[in-house]
Amino acid sequence: MKNIRRKNRRRPEPMLAAERKKDPGVTKLTPRDDNELDAYKKRALYAAFVLLFFFAVIISRLWFLQMQKGEYYRELADSNRVRYLEVAAPRGNVVDRYGREIVTNRPSFNVVWVREDNKIDDEWLKKITRILGVDVSDILEKIRKMAHNPGHIPVRLAEDIDWETVAKIENNRMDLPGIKIEVVPLRVYHWGNHASHLIGYLGEINKKQLAASEPGIYRGGDLVGKMGLERLREKDLRGEKGRNYMEVNALGFEQKNLKGIEPLPGNDLRLTLDMELQKAAEEIMDEQDYAGAVVALEANSGRLLVLASAPALHLDEFVGGISHKAWNAMLDNPHHPLVNKLVQGQYPPGSTYKIITALAGLAEGVITPDSVIYCPGHYRFGNRTYRCWKRGGHGAVNLKRALSESCDVYFYQVGQRLGVDRLAKYAKLFGLGEKTGIEMEHEKPGLVPTAAWKKNRFGKSWQEGETLSIAIGQGFNLVTPVQLALMTAALANGGTLYKPTLVEEVKDPDGHVIESFTPVVLERLRGQGRNLKLVREGLVEAVNGKRGTGRRARVSDKNIMVGGKTGTAQVVRLKQYIHLKEEDIPYKYRDHALFICFAPAENPEIVVAVVVEHGLHGGSAAAPVARAVLEKYFAGKYALEEIDTVVVPQRMLEGDSPLLVNDIAGDILRQQTQVIQ
Amino acid sequence: MLRFDRRLILHFDWVMLLMLVLVSGMALANLYSSTWNGSGSASPVFFKQLYLFVAALFLILLFISVDYIELATFGYLMYGGVVLLLLYTTLFVDTIAGTQRWINLGFFKLQPSEPAKLTLVLVLASCYSKNEVRDGYRIRDLIKPGILTAIPFVLIMIQPDLGTALMLGILFVSMTLFVKLRWSTVGILGGAGLACVLFGWKYLLKDYQRRRIETFLNPEGDPMNHGYQIMQSKIAVGSGKTFGKGFMEGTQGHLNFLPERHTDFAFSVWGEEWGFAGAVFFLSCYFFLLLWGINIALSARDKFGVLLAYGLVMMIFWQAVINLFMIMGFLPVVGIPLPLFSYGGSSLITTMVAIGILMNIRMRRFQTT
């Protein structure tokens, strides 16, 4: 081969050119050409192998992508194309003990635009703005805000529209492509602002809550309970969101609907509360423009009947986020509506504390019911004079009179005999100085001072004179209204301290009870039945006796005896106010008025505790409030006994599926359109 | 000039025609699916491609009627014409989407860079088959083919259309390696080539081109753009699994997740809708067509024929490999279509003409003069 090539090379080049010129059409084949042709073809054969090699590479890559990882890529393709919209679950309803609705949902209608693209037709825009009665710029602004969101998320053009508008849109459905009516459950407060601190309100979830919650439950913009039971029972009330699955294109615009998941409504709460009583309590507090708290509970179970903190919150101001102005107004209000006074308000118990002092005295044997102490209107101890509220003095008083007329001197002496620590022991047995565990937020524990506590807190030893103040409920003592009520209940029922409860039962959407009330005993005072009865007798005398301090708590039904104790808690002891008339003392320095009571006296069922902030006198300010609650309670009780049936809780949304909401909406709609036609 | 020979009919390349129709049939079916817009009938794009295919069949008839040897000289004429068109695009055509590639002929947008590939193969085959070099090609013997390549290369680079320009480079390398080179030439060219790549990366590439390559090397860095395209393409192909989602049932394509789904990423749609089975069938047909082209080279009657057939096969082959590699995530996004399969008139006509020339070489394998 080499030889041939050499020979070839020797061939003069010009000849080839000459040959070509002779016959320009076809190149003449030469032997040398043949050889080179063979070499070329050999290389072409190599090229075939290169082709086959790449073929193999491509096929094996396809094998990898389609056969080995096919499932993975199929999932990716599905997650590409399938999107979902969450469907809000109706929150659980809240009803009172008789099934009267407190908070439920109503369907609200929003106008949404489901985009196929972001283009807007002028005609369409004109029509929709006319129907909704809004400015074109408003609509455009809303669309612009949403333009960057994924296309499958509808643009909300109007919220909570009325029936007329719904009907108009339905009638013009043909001319309004992409416009849909979205049904969203909204909270309805059937009793206005009553029980507002207890129920609480909803607000948009914040970043912290969102981060703390389990993934998948919430999204930004969701409404969650921000206060009260709405917050504490969020898990029960929220239900489970549904999902509408849909197929979207690469721009995120909906192409078709796929099968979805129905939302599961939240659980319903039945409270122990009696809303009629609650309303009565709040109304009287409101009428008098009182700030304070009213607690009523069943003496023998701890079921709460009334839980009112006045003034009430304006729940409607919280819907959709409270304004800065409204918030500041609440902060500046001297009646402090934001404070839940039921558990956050700590007040000196005043004379109501004499119950403890009396019982401790009897139990420890430092007095008997017949022990007589002379009250000249003051009591000299050490080099100080302790005054009785009655300047002229009560004269000789026994236990009954001391309680009914609230003689300070009597209890100074009892307190002095007991000492601070023995007093504290009984106070604790009545649940004072500790949180009660009620389902309310930010509960304060109150305060029961002891010698050790003072040493610890101030580094000073206890002065015996201070015990005198403690014995009549002044000094370091602090209680919350709920504690006062519990203490009274323990007195009324013979010494059992029940945990205060406000949820009677929790029912799932199918009506199965998943949680129901059982009384919880926190503390039991043993062997004191007789002594408790003696104290109760003193309290009955306080309301019914001629000189009793709580006479204003008597109810109109003469068959029902009420036992009660007034209290007046000094807010501040300032010399410049001592000589002023009470009405001239600035509001914030006036004394608090307290009243606790139980009824009927012989076999107590209900206990009421009332605190009126800066109300001056328990007998005049707080007792009438308690009376109003008692009147309502007994009136309602006898009325109920006649009917003898319990109203079955009626859910607003029967069946509670949004589908049904739609159906109801659709039914009403059909009726509406028929009327129009 | 035109001599009719009975043997031409006798030796007509039925195999090539069959493969052409088979592959084009699948291509058209795929185009029908990928451009389906939900209305009752096929899209205008589909009909346009169908008409062009029929027109190109006539063009094939024209190209097989003349002995391919005429192309040895006629090729230079075509080459000159294409260079003029490229110059025209660079100088007078308005920029579309950052590049100047198309000349609007009213009924058809001509992309001169497509026929540029074909004419380059023609002139290189002509050039290499005429030159006789003792002991292989020296550098100086490569000056002429080098210049022939450089002219359209630079003009296309200016557009800028990196992918097609690189295609020209690849064709030059494929054809040059085919002829006998001296080792020193190989060494010098290899070194120079490497230097060019480094230099080009640093100074010549536009930012977006560099980004594409970087994206390919690190796809997570740019998930929404080029990395996104390749990812969506892989999802489309992979989600086809064994037998695919069915004709017209591909979700990646029909819901617009796939970019350029009827042009550069047409095969992704095929893979999605027909699965591994369909893809293997199509690729077998496609590669059989290419191997048949090599077979034509092996049976060609002269050096020009061999070189030309080889060059044309390489032209189709490398585009196909680059396109498929891109679709399957082996290469960054480069604007190279899958010949015969991707939508695009210029590419279709160029490829059909190339196949016509191959058939021409096949038919005249027995002719000697």
Image (cartoon, grey):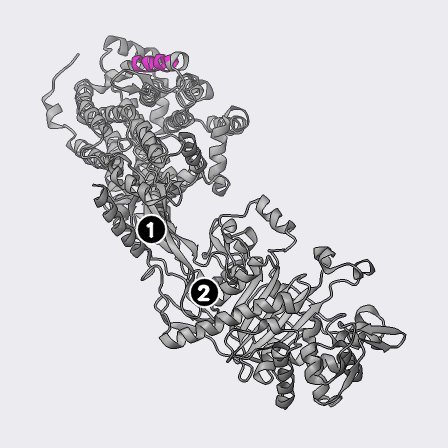
The location of residue B78, given as percent across then percent down, is 30, 15
Work out whether A506 lies above or below B256.
below
Most extreme residue toward the left is B6
Residue A112 among those drawn in magenta? no
Give the residue drawn at x 26%, y 39%.
A173
Q: Earlier in the sequence, mark 2 or mark 1?
A: 2
Foreground pick, A449 / B110:
A449
Count of labels shown?
2
Q: Which residue is mark 1?
A: A245
The disc numbered 2 marks a residue on which chain? A
Going 65% across and 72% down the picture, which residue do you hit? Answer: A566
Q: How far apart in space, not on screen, are marks 2 and 1 (Cα)?
A: 26 Å
Q: Where does residue B132 sit, x and y in percent of width and height?
A: 36, 19
**Percent position of residue A455, x then y:** 82, 73
Residue B119 placement, left or right of A586? left
Expressed as whole percent of the image width and height from the top left, the position of residue A37 reads 29, 27
**Rendered-image quadrant of the N terminus of chain A:** top left
Query: Is the C terminus of chain A in the top left, top right, bottom left or bottom right quadrant?
Result: top left
Residue A659: quarter of image: bottom left
Q: Amino acid at mark 1?
A: Tyr
Decide: marks 2, 1 in contact (CB < 8 A)? no
Q: Which residues are magenta?
A: B77-88
Residue at the disc numbered 2: A236
Local SS, label 2:
helix
User: Which amino acid, mark 2?
Assistant: Asp
